[in-house]
Structures are given as C-alpha cells and as structure tokens.
Image (tube, rainbow, N blue to C red):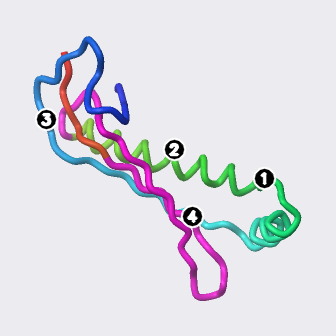
C-alpha cells in the first residue's frame, strides 16, 4: 500500500476516495526509562530507550491506519499526519501516544 503526506502521487490518478482513516497507539514507558530519560534531560543527549518506544508506537499507529484503509477497499493513503503526545498517568509515570490519520483512496 502506498502512503504519503502529500495530497496525491505524481503520475498516479486518484479514482475513488474511501474516507478518513486513523490509527492510535499508546505505549507505556517503564520507570527505568523515566529515570534514565530524566538524567538525560539534566545532562543532555538522546534517550535511546524512549526513541525505541516512540518508533514502535509510530509503527503500530501506521499499521492500524493501513488496516482500516484496506478494510475500506483502498490501495493508498494520502495526506497522512502523525501526532505525538505524552500522557501523564496517576502514579506519576507517563505513556507515549501516537496518532496517525489520512485519507484512504484508490489509485490507478
């Protein structure tokens, strides 16, 4: 399935619009990731463990969106947008949320 953030594919014609599709993923980050990310925040640098969780959440959200597009009979998704949020939970921890949305289409 073809996926793009633009409104179409060069050289390909959209022949049918199947509607808005989306997918969401919320993944927990354990207390050790939170601890090491807090240290990284103080001293600087990248947090590899959070980056892995973020990539996994993005992959899951996109896969959910594509499954929804397939169910509607689409062979492509245009106008894809990814949104990222951190959700705070009661015990002081956090979870990472990724939402993917786009328009399911049929292209020639």
Residue ID for mark 1: 46
- Measure the C-alpha gap from mark 4 to mark 1: 16 Å
- Please report whichever mark, 2 or 3, sits nearer to the chain's N-terminal start: 3
Q: Nearer the viewer, residue 105 or 66?
A: 105
Return the mark for residue 104: none
Q: Position of residue 39 (x, y in %)?
A: 85, 68
Q: Is 15 on the left-hand or right-hand side of 101?
A: left
Q: Is residue 87 magenta?
A: yes
- Please report whichever mark, 2 or 4, sits nearer to the chain's N-terminal start: 2
- Measure the C-alpha gap from mark 2 to mark 4: 13 Å
Residue at the image position 20 percent from the left and 32 percent from the top: 105
- Please report whichever mark, 3 or 1, sits nearer to the chain's N-terminal start: 3
Q: Is residue 33 magenta?
A: no
- Please report whichever mark, 4 or 1, sits nearer to the chain's N-terminal start: 1
User: Is the residue under label 1 in contact with that under label 4 (CB below 8 Å)?
Assistant: no
Bounds of the magenta segment: 72-101
* Picture quarter with the N terminus: top left
Element type where label 1 sits in the image: loop
Residue at the image position 23 percent from the left and 37 percent from the top: 104
Residue ID for mark 3: 17
Q: Position of residue 64 (x, y in %)?
A: 38, 47
Which residue is the extreme one toward the bottom?
A: 90
- Measure the C-alpha gap from mark 3 to mark 1: 40 Å
Residue ID for mark 4: 96
Residue at the image position 20 percent from the left and 21 percent from the top: 107
């Amino acid at each position: 399935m073809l996926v793009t953030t633009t409104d179409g594919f060069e050289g390909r014609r959209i022949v049918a619009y199947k509607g808005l599709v989306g997918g969401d993923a919320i993944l927990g980050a354990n207390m050790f990731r939170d601890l090491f990310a807090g240290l990284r925040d103080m001293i600087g640098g990248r947090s590899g463990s959070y980056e892995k969780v973020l990539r996994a959440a993005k992959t899951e959200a996109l896969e959910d969106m594509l499954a929804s597009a397939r169910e509607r009979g689409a062979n492509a998704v245009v106008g894809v947008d990814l949104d990222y949020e951190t959700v705070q939970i009661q015990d002081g921890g956090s979870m990472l949320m990724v939402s993917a949305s786009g328009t399911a289409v049929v292209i020639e």
